[in-house]
Image: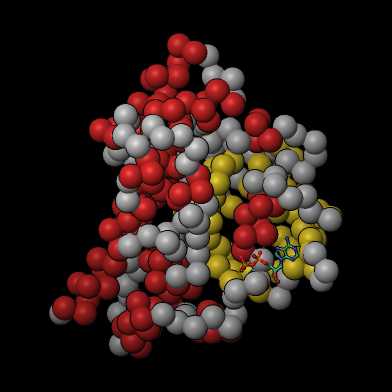
Amino acid sequence: MIKINNLTFGYKENIFENANATIDNNKITFIIGKNGSGKSTLANILTGLIKPKKGKIIIDNIEITKKIKLSNLRTKISMVFQNPSNQILFNKVYDDIKFTLENINTKEEEIDQKIKESLETVDMLEYINSNPYKLSGGEKQRIAISSILALNPKYIVFDESTSMLDINGKNSIYKLLNKLKNKGIGIIFITNILDELVYADEILIIDDKQIYKYTKKELFNNLNILKEHNLELPFTLKIIEKLNQKGIKAYNEKDILKEISK
Ligand code: ADP
């Protein structure tokens, strides 16, 4: 579990003031909030890239806000960024993942196996010798994810990682989320696309320098919560709201389609 304890951080003005939250290791936790509310800042704090002014971040009983080597931290928590092209360094998929593994001093004889396993998980093994620059956005993003998987982290933060992908690319990432969760990886998924909440288990909303936590059920049963946090309902959630008004519960894509087709 990740514990955010009394987090205070800001640049000129505070973005967080004594904010508290927990993130489970066996859940898909979404982080949402208005533009500029502090989603990316929180991602950077959780992954140790920036230090809080006050408060603690504790990941599985290790306080990461203390002095901790970033390379050690990456085996606990790693981040997939928005632009898949920015995460590629070499012109061969194999070399890209190898570089990540070498950075954490992986034994030479283990490197081959780890590269293959991580590519297998994201369904990209057949691209092991391909040029990543020539792949589609979604494929590049899956290569970035496989680099991270090679580190065997307990948590992965996705910082708007689907925002630059087409629908096929987006779907390939959504499909992966549950697969990674079932491997015991805690997923932290930051997004501006609120339709994506159908893939969440739990939702953190950043608002007014605080972090509010809801289960998907709680939120979907009372979508006014989003409006109270000044977030607009996207099309998918408007449908869920309409179904709710008729006493029908729907929490995922499959349920929604089933209910509206009745
Ligand atoms: P979000 O991801 O929710 O859009 P951010 O975490 O990117 O929000 O930004 C939160 C606030 O902090 C914004 O007002 C933004 O302008 C400001 N901010 C972000 N990064 C910096 C920085 N490096 N220097 C100064 N202000 C920043």
- Could you tell me residue 75's position as x and y percent? 58, 33
- Could you tell me residue 141's position as x and y percent? 41, 48
Q: Quadrant of the N terminus?
A: top right
Observer-nearest of 205 and 98? 98
In the image, residue 231 sits, relative to residue 25, either above or below, namely below
Determine the image quadrant of residue 162: bottom left
Left or right of residue 111: residue 102:
right
Observer-nearest of 184 and 128? 128
In the image, residue 216 sits, relative to residue 85, either above or below, namely below
- Name the residue rendered at 60%, 36% in the picture: 74
Q: Quadrant of the C terminus?
A: bottom left
Determine the image quadrant of residue 13: bottom right
Residue 18 appears in the rendering: no
As drawn, the residue found furthest toward the top would be 109
- Name the residue rendered at 53%, 36% in the picture: 153
Left or right of residue 131: residue 261:
left
- Could you tell me residue 128's position as x and y percent? 32, 30
- Could you tell me residue 56's position as x and y percent? 77, 49
Residue 68 appears in the rendering: yes
In the image, residue 221 sits, relative to residue 182, either above or below, namely below
- Name the residue rendered at 41%, 35% in the picture: 91
Ligand 1: quadrant of the figure: bottom right
- Name the residue rendered at 32%, 46% in the picture: 135
Observer-nearest of 152 and 79? 79
Observer-nearest of 256 and 8? 8
As drawn, the residue found furthest toward the left would be 262
